[in-house]
Image (cartoon, rainbow, N blue to C red):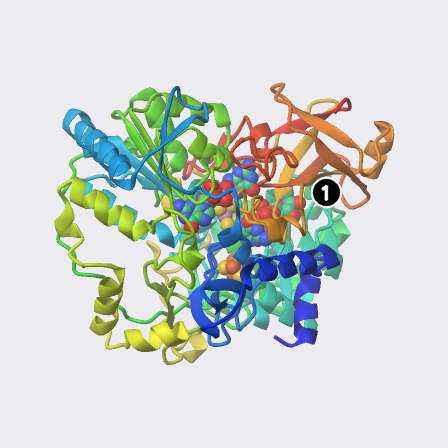
Amino acid sequence: MDSVSRRKFLKIGGASVVLSAATQSALGRVEELAKTKSSKGLEKIPTFCDICFWKCGAIAYVEDGKLWKVEGNPLDPLSRGRLCPRGTGGIGAHYDPDRLKYPLMRKSVRGEERWNQVTWDEALTFIADKMKKIKNDYGPEAMALFSHGIGGNFIKHLFKAYGSANIGAPSFAQCRGPRDVGFNLTFGEDVASPERTDIKNAQCLVLIGSHLGENMHNTQVQEFSDALANGVSLIVVDPRVSVAAGKAKYYLPIKPGADMALLLAWMQVLVTERLYNKPYVEKYGFGFDNFAAEILPYSPEWAYPETGIEPEVIRATAREMARYQPATLIHPGRHVTWYGDDAQRSRAIALLNALMGNWGVKGGFYYPVSMDVPSYPYPEYPHSDKPKVDNPDNKFPFAHEVNTNGIRKATISGEPYPVKGWFVYATNLIHALPDEQETIRAIQNLDLLVVIDVIPAEIAGWADVVLPEAVYLERHDDLNVEWFREPFISLRQPVVEAPHDQKPNWWIAKKLADKLDLGHYFPWKDIEEYLEHRLNAAGLSYGQLKKEGIIRGEKQPIYFAEGVPDVFPTPSGKIEFYSLQLAEAGFDPVPKYTQPAPPPAGFFRLLYGRAPVHSFSRTQSNRVLMDMIGENEVWINQDIANRYGLKSGDFIRLKNQDGVISNRIKVKATERIRTDCVYMIHGFGHNSRMLKFAYQKGASDAQLITRYKTDPLMGGTAMNVNFVTFELEA
Ligand SMILES: Nc1nc2c(c(=O)[nH]1)N[C@H]1C(S)=C(S)[C@@H](COP(=O)(O)OP(=O)(O)OC[C@H]3O[C@@H](n4cnc5c(=O)[nH]c(N)nc54)[C@H](O)[C@@H]3O)O[C@H]1N2
Ligand SMILES: Nc1nc2c(c(=O)[nH]1)N[C@H]1C(S)=C(S)[C@@H](COP(=O)(O)OP(=O)(O)OC[C@H]3O[C@@H](n4cnc5c(=O)[nH]c(N)nc54)[C@H](O)[C@@H]3O)O[C@H]1N2
Ligand code: SF4
Ligand SMILES: [Mo]
């Protein structure tokens, strides 16, 4: 990456990301640590990153068995040879002194972090015995798996072989679930990950609560940077002046929770002024006339008191979108579990995009493609007569993945049937699910809690058995067969050895399968045999993949204009402006607006989001990344701060509507946020004592999220419904 593009890339990430002198020196220290005497010379080993789920292709530089840096792999279409700052800092995960080193078993009561160090054989025998007993007493469905990321694939396979399909990830009900449901109901397909957004070709881009630049999903940030360089007209809607908002042509500081009102008013303008893409809507739309009639009352004047956005600004931005259609992209966002109307709000975003005529069109949403690599020919999984535990009586009819919070609920109530064991792979449920106490109540009902992690995160503190995993730089994982603009596969492979007795997930799954008498589901000797088998079946070379990290396929059509068939797998076969499916299930066929409950007097709505150099609660033990942002701050509007006598740098505590008080957190008094809300970065405020370095640095938003609203369509947990006030005596 040349220095100009590097600077441009980092600039999008906000001033705070420009590698500070301190960071340079931290990297220097790690390099120093790594560079003892060299005899083998320098090796460059390709793999792909796991500091978040974007899976950027990377090249690790290893000298004499020591890792000293990771860079982007130029062959990789996702990273285009550049990692984000988190990816570059990924080496800190390997060198973290607070890592889990050996298998641990709980000494006394759950939640007391007191442990016995045990061997892998002892730990896995204990787990297998418990799992057999649970299967015997309650059936295999009484074991549930929480798993996030590609590393969970072999554990998922083990669970299916054992007989349980109760497998959930927080990436559905706490993240993108409502978005994918809203888009599915409209176009018959979802937005997927990596998002199929054609940002680089958009001429007008609308970010409504998505803050690319702090949200550092690499390809999107690079494409955003390209689009800005090409003069994209940017409209940003956010109660806070995000990094992206700072670059916008129109910045709309919306009242939190009123996005649906704005979306309806925008659509009303486009329809009443007949500015939408008429030929596209006529060709592909279903129920447009009903839709148009339903949105008629939502004028900009109606929306003004709800949103705080002047009618003229609403009209001007709607016209701006119309000007560039079909290359106007209203970004669907990703973490959309906000106010409880989330699937319907996402559907409104889908409909606004449909009015632009951008689905299947350059500058809108493309059709992702992938390489054809057969899955491994395993024996068939056992059949279960029980439905999944998370959604009894199909209460949430549009949930198409398992809801983590549904498993939690069933674990507490024993309904529709008992859940007695949890297996937790790479998700820190204490920070990821709202209402920590509900999670703890569920955990107290379990006969078995197993946690596989790389650091002693909060969830590990509650476990009966903690299994230390080798970090991504030290292991193979399943093959990444990516769906993207162009087809490619990528390989994760070890670049260094695990420093202690940590093991990779595939090894853990296979060993446990043996002890559960399920060894025939893992017929391969080791993961390389598995990978080679899959590549051979696809007519590809494992040798080439090992050497290059990436194999790219032939480019394929991704737009209607290039030959992608223009079919919509909805019930009507068209884009559903009016949804009969929703009407039949008793929901609004066209989205409607409900006003969110306002903050109580003296309270402010708690908002939260991403920091460009951290991933959730997983990176606060990483010394390299902590050197860039070492704690979080709470953004408070300057006038409000003045009223409370607060200035930037002061420490306070936040107290929520239920009396929960946070750790100490630094004040950032700023004009860049509305007066009715405060904002903080998610992931800080660790209370696990074993996380020696991260312990109590900053405050945890999750701890303050004691309430949530449930999305009636799909069961997701809306978390922007909590309010805080200030405890000045920190
Ligand atoms: N309050 C609040 N809650 C949220 C969010 C929020 O912003 N605020 N965001 C939501 C969103 S968008 C999402 S996607 C989810 C994310 O939810 P999670 O994916 O659960 O996020 P983390 O808190 O980072 O927890 C990840 C855990 O995996 C561990 N880990 C990291 N690498 C490895 C590895 O290689 N192997 C193993 N075995 N473990 C590993 C980490 O140490 C950490 O304990 O959270 C959701 N919940
Ligand atoms: N660096 C980094 N990047 C990441 C991640 C990470 O952990 N670190 N995680 C990745 C994942 S899994 C996800 S899901 C995405 C999440 O990234 P995004 O989908 O971009 O969402 P959030 O981080 O939740 O950011 C929320 C933004 O919405 C604003 N907001 C809050 N309430 C409202 C409202 O009522 N209306 C509007 N219009 N705006 C509002 C907040 O001020 C904030 O700017 O980030 C991804 N990228
Ligand atoms: S976006 Fe950053 S952290 Fe995520 S995989 Fe890519 S380089 Fe790694
Ligand atoms: Mo997410």
Task: Identify the residue at image location x=42%, y=68%.
Answer: 367
Vertical placement of 306 versus 179: above or below?
Answer: above
Q: Nearer the viewer, residue 198 or 364?
A: 198
Vertical placement of 630 versus 528: above or below?
Answer: above
Task: Identify the residue at image location x=72%, y=44%.
Answer: 301
Left or right of 607 on screen, residue 398: left
- Please state the horizontal and vertical placement of residue 696, each as a whole percent of the image: 62, 33
Q: Is residue 235 visible?
A: no
Left or right of 172 on screen, residue 334: right
Q: Nearer the viewer, residue 214 or 540?
A: 540
Picture quadrant of residue 13: bottom right
Picture quadrant of residue 466: top left
Task: Identify the residue at image location x=64%, y=38%.
Answer: 607
- Please state the horizontal and vertical placement of residue 333, each as a whole percent of the image: 55, 52
Q: Is residue 726 visible?
A: yes
Tell me the quarter of the image containing the N terminus: bottom right
Q: Check disc 1 and report its element: helix, strand or loop.
A: helix
- Please state the horizontal and vertical placement of residue 716, each as a whole percent of the image: 45, 38
Left or right of 297 on screen, residue 524: left
> Which class describes the residues within 10 Å of circle 1: few (<14), some (14-19), or many (20+)?
some
Task: Identify the residue at image location x=55%, y=49%.
Answer: 615
Q: Nearer the viewer, residue 409 or 393?
A: 409
Vertical placement of 507 versus 203: above or below?
Answer: above
Q: Amino acid at mark 1?
A: Tyr
Left or right of 70 on screen, residue 117: left
Residue receiving disc 1: 304
Q: Nearer the viewer, residue 503 or 186?
A: 503
